[in-house]
Image (tube, helix red, strand yellow):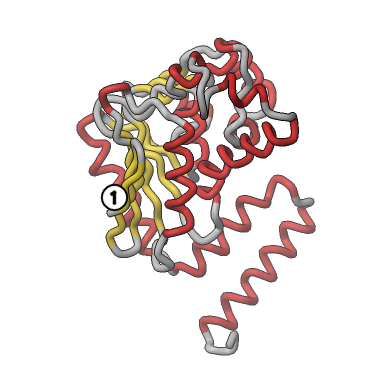
Amino acid sequence: MTTGPGVRLECAGPVATVTLCRPDVLNAQTPAMWQALRDFSRSLPGDVRVVVVRGEGRTFSAGLDLSVATATGPGSFAELARLPESECADRIAEFQAAFTWLHRPDIVSVAAVQGHAIGAGFQLALACDLRVLTEDARLSMAEVTLGLVPDLAGTGRLVDLVGYSRALEICATGRRIDAAEADRIGLATLVVPPTDLTGATDDLVAALLAGNRDAVIEIKALLAGAARRTPAEQQRAEREAQVRRLRDLTGLGE
C-alpha cells in the first residue's frame, strides 16, 4: 500500500485501487492530493490491468477543498494567480496529469461513484474509462459557481460522452445530474443500489480481466480514437490491429 495526503494506492495482482480518504470533508481534493495521484501513476506495477478509483465514506468527492480557494499561502489560488501566465499554466498542467494518467492505453480505469461527484470529483470520474454509479449519486460540474472553468481534463471527456450542446448546458449551469439522467445521457456505465456498489464494481473488473490483455488494449485504442478518424481511417486501424493480434496469437509477431 502507498499513501499520500488524503489518498492511497493498493495493488492486488492486476487490480490497483485508488481511494480518496478524507471522508470527514467528503473527500474534498487539494493540490497535494493531485501530486500524490501523479506519483501513483509513476509507481504503478507493470502487471496492473485495471485501476479502480473510489471515495471513502458516503461521497465520492465533493470537489475542490474550498480552503484552497480562500487561502493565501503556498498552493492557494491566490499564489497561483500571482505566477507569470506561463508558470501558472504549467502548474495547472501538473494538476491535469493527476487525472490524465487514467486515460493510459495499457489500463482500463473504473470509477465507483456514490453520493456526490462535484467539480474536481466529477472530472475525476470522467477521467476514468467506465463509471459505476449508485442510485443516489449526483454529478455536477460546479466550477462556474466559483467563477472558474473545468480545467482538470474534464471538458473533452464530457463532450465525447454527451455531445457539445449538452456539455455546454451542464458546465455553464453547474446543475446537479442524478444517476437516472446520467444513465440516460451516457455518463454512467452502470447504475446500482448503494449496497451493490462494491459487488457490481468487482463483477465489472472481473469481466474486464477475463479478456486477453493485448486484445483489450487494442480495443481501447480503436474506440478511443474513433471519433477523430474518418471511416476509412478507422477501418484501416481495425485492420492493422487485427493483423497484430493474428500474428501474436500464431507466434509470428516476435
Between 176 and 42, the one nearer to me in the picture: 42
Q: How many numbered circles are shown?
A: 1
Which residue sits at x=51%, y=28%? Answer: 74
In the rendered image, residue 238, in percent from the top left (x then y), is placed at: 67, 64
Which residue sits at x=52%, y=17%? Answer: 142
Q: Answer left or right for 70 relative to 236.
A: left
The C terminus - image quarter? bottom right
Between 66 and 188, the one nearer to me in the picture: 66
Which residue sits at x=36%, y=61%? Answer: 209
In the rendered image, residue 64, in percent from the top left (x then y), is placed at: 46, 23
Which residue sits at x=35%, y=29%? Answer: 60
Question: Relative to 132, is 17 above or below?
Answer: below
Residue extending farthest to the left is 195
Between 59 and 238, the one nearer to me in the picture: 59
Q: Which type of secondary structure does the marked residue at label 1 adopt?
A: helix
Residue extending farthest to the front is 73
In the rendered image, residue 122, in percent from the top left (x then y), is placed at: 48, 28
Give the amino acid at mark 1: Asp
List the residue tagged with mark 1: 203
In the rendered image, residue 39, in percent from the top left (x then y), is placed at: 46, 51
Q: Answer left or right for 156 relative to 107.
A: right
The N terminus - image quarter? bottom left
Q: Residues within 10 Å of mark 1 (few under 14, many from 20)?
A: few
**Residue 94 position by quadrant:** top right
